[in-house]
Image (tube, helix red, strand yellow):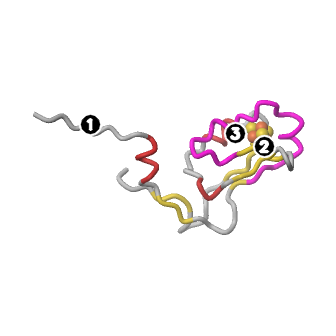
């Protein structure tokens, strides 16, 4: 009998996800200065599974790649300064999950 590994990796699962990005971001950083001066660890850059948040050293601000947001809501609780304004994308936009 041949054994088939049916376990999917996270990368396999994310490959099934489809996005319909809006031209307006549904995520905003309330106070960019706060990220630079009062948030040394910048947890948003590592708690988001879609890596939406990235520190830009040139402009000293967080880049928000909202187009890849998985709408999991992690960042709403992970920012220690409550500095992320997140709302659901407008109807018809955002992430579309296939197979669950
Ligand atoms: S966790 Fe919050 S305060 Fe810190 S860098 Fe990210 S958005 Fe800014």
> Which mark lies nearer to you, 2 or 3?
3
Q: Is residue 31 magenta?
A: yes
Left or right of residue 89, residue 64 in this image? right
- Asked if disc 2 and disc 3 are in contact, CB closer than 8 Å, the reply is no
Picture mark count? 3
> Can residue 83 be seen here?
yes
Q: Which residues are magenta?
A: 28-53
Is 76 located above or below residue 43 in the figure? below
- Give me the C-alpha separation between circle 1 and circle 3: 34 Å
Label 1 C-beta lies within 8 Å of the nearest ligand 1 atom? no
- Give me the C-alpha separation between circle 2 and circle 3: 10 Å
Residue at the (83%, 40%) spot, across then down: 35
Question: Which numbered dot is residue 83?
Answer: 2
> Which mark lies nearer to you, 1 or 2?
1
On the rendering, which quadrant does ligand 1 occupy? top right
Residue at the (69%, 39%) spot, across then down: 45
Question: Which numbered dot is residue 44?
Answer: 3
Left or right of residue 99, residue 37 in this image? right
Mark 1 or mark 2, which has the lower sequence index?
Answer: 1
| Of 42 and 11, the residue lying toward us | 11
Mark 2 or mark 3, which has the lower sequence index?
Answer: 3
Residue at the (75%, 35%) spot, across then down: 42
- Asked if disc 1 and disc 2 are in contact, CB closer than 8 Å, the reply is no
Question: Which numbered dot is residue 5?
Answer: 1
């Amino acid at each position: 009998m041949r054994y088939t590994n049916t376990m999917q990796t996270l990368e396999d699962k994310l490959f099934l996800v489809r996005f319909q990005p809006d031209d307006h971001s549904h995520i905003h950083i309330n106070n960019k200065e706060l990220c630079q001066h009062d948030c040394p660890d910048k947890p948003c850059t590592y708690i988001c599974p879609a890596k939406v948040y990235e520190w830009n050293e040139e402009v000293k601000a967080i880049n928000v790649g909202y187009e890849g947001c998985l709408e999991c809501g992690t960042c709403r609780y992970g920012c220690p300064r409550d500095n992320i304004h997140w709302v659901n994308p407008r109807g018809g936009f955002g992430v579309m999950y296939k197979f669950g």
